[in-house]
Image: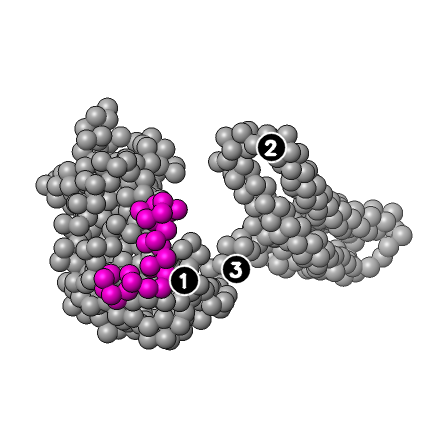
Amino acid sequence: MVPFIILVAVFPVNWAAGLIFLITAPLVPLFMALVGMKAAEANRKNFKALQRLSGFFYDRLRGLATIRLFNRAEAEARQLEYASEDFRRRTMEVLRLAFLSSAVLEFFTALSIAITAVYFGFSYIGELNFGHYGITITLFTGLFVLILAPEFYQPLRDLGTFYHAKAQAIGAAESIVEFLDTKAEGMARGDTVIPSPDSVSISAENLEVLSPDGVTLAGPLTFRIAAGEKVALVGPSGAGKTSLVNAILGFLPYRGSLKINGVEMSSLNQESWHRQISWVGQNPMLVHGSVRENLCLSRPNVDSDTLENAVRNAYADEFINRLEKGYEHHVGDRASGVSVGQAQRIAVARALIQNGSFWLLDEPTASLDANSEKLVAASLTEAIRQKTSLTVTHRLAQLTDKNQVWVMDKGQLVQQGKLDDISKSGLLKEMITAVDKGDIDA
C-alpha cells in the first residue's frame, strides 16, 4: 500500500513526478518476474544436483569399508569430485542470477529516482515548464518528492527479494511436491474402521499389486487367511513377496479385491488397520531417541509391567540391564549405539508391546545368533498363538507349525496348502532338496 499512498501524496504536488513514478514502477516487478522465472529453473537444476551429490556421498560413506577392500577409493573419489564440480557450477549459476536480479532492481530504481531529480533540476533552471499546475516549483516540492522517491520503490525492491526467495523455494520443493501430489491408482483411502478388530481375516481375489506409477509387480493372486490362521510365505529373491506384504500393509496400490475382515482395503481407514498390526522386519528400524522411546513407539503410555514383560519375552533385558543408562540409553540414526542383534530384539519387544491382532514377521530372527534365534522364535510362537500371522521366511525349518504355506515365484502364488501336501512336488520340493544338499540355508 505504501507506493499507492505516496502517489496520492505526490500527484497533488507535482503530476509530472507522480507520472514518472507511475510509469517506472511496473518495470521493477516485470523484470523481477523475468529474472525470477530463470532463477526458479536454475534452482530446480541446482536442487537435483544437490540430491545426486548427497545420495552419492551417503551411499559411498555407508560402503566405505567395501570400497577400500575392493581398491575403489581413488575411482570413487574422482566420481565424487565430478559430482561436486557439477553442483558448484549450478550453485554459481543460481548466485549469478541472484546478483543479476538485485542489479536489475537497483538499476531501475536508481534510474527512476535519477529521472525525477533531472526533471526537478531542469525545472529549477527554467528548461522544463510542466507538471506544476501553473504554480512555481519550490525547493520544498523538490525535496518532498525526492525524499519520498526511495520509499516509493523500496516495497517493490522488497517484493523482488521475496520473489527470488520464492523461486529458490519452488526449485527446492519441486521433488517433494511432486511426490506428495502423486495419485496412484488404487490408493484411495476410506473412512471405514476395521470391524471386529480383535480377530483379523484377509482375503484376495485376482489381486494385482502395482507400483505407484501403475506397473504390475505381482499377481493376479487369490488367497484367504482365516482369523487365527498362521501362514508362511516362501520363495526365491525377487519372487514378489515384499510387494505382496506392502499391499497388505496398504503401502502399494492394487487392482482386484483385497479385503480385511470383509472390508476392501481401498475403503479402509488405514490408521485403524495399522493399529492392529505387529510387525517385525529383518532390518529393524529404530528412531533417534532412547531405548524406551523405541520400545514404546506404538504405545507411549504403556505401563511398566507390560513394558518389562515384553522386554523379558524378547530377551532384550539381557543387554538393556547392562547398559549404563538402561532404558534411557541413547539410540542414534540407523540404530547406532546398539548392535544389529540388539536392535532386532528391541523390534521384537516393540511388537510384543503393540500386541496387534495381525502379526507380520519378515525374517524376524535373521540378525540373531543361533541361541538368541531359538529363544526369540519361541517367544514369537507364543505371542502369535491365538493371532492371525503371516511370516516371510527363507528358513524352511520354520514351516512346520504353520496352517498354510504359500510358495511365490515370479509374482505368482505357485503353491498353497499344508506343508505335507505341497512339499512333495513343485518349487517347494526343489527348495527342500536344495536344503538337503546344503545348497541353501535350512
Residue that appears at 24% across and 55% down: 399
Q: How far apart are labels 2 and 3 at the CA level?
A: 35 Å
- Secondary structure under tag 2 reads loop
Return the residue at label 3: 178
Judging depth in this view, the residue of 170 and 24 nearest the camera is 170
Which circle's residue, 2 or 1, is located before the other in the chain? 2
How many numbered discs, if any? Answer: 3
- Secondary structure under tag 1 reads strand
Name the magenta segment's main secondary structure. helix
Q: How far apart are labels 1 and 3 at the CA level?
A: 33 Å
Name above or below for residue 162 compared with residue 326: below
Residue 97 point in image, percent of width and height: 70, 46
* Crowding at mark 1 (Cα within 10 Å: few <14, some 14-19, many 20+): some
Q: How far apart are labels 2 and 1 at the CA level?
A: 36 Å
Q: Are marks 1 and 3 in contact (CB under 8 Å)?
A: no
Judging depth in this view, the residue of 236 and 284 nearest the camera is 236
Which circle's residue, 2 or 3, is located before the other in the chain? 2
Residue that appears at 32% across and 32% down: 339
Q: Give the amino acid type for the residue marked by disc 3 in the picture.
A: Glu
Return the residue at label 2: 72
Residue that appears at 29% across and 52% down: 396
Q: Nearer the viewer, mark 2 or mark 3?
A: 2
The region drawn magenta spans 417-442
Judged left or right of residue 72, residue 123 is: right
User: Residue extending furthest left?
Assistant: 305
Q: Is residue 307 visible?
A: no
Which circle's residue, 1 or 3, is located before the other in the chain? 3
Residue 433 point in image, percent of width and height: 34, 53
* Crowding at mark 2 (Cα within 10 Å: few <14, some 14-19, many 20+): few
Return the residue at label 1: 409
Q: Is residue 228 visible?
A: yes
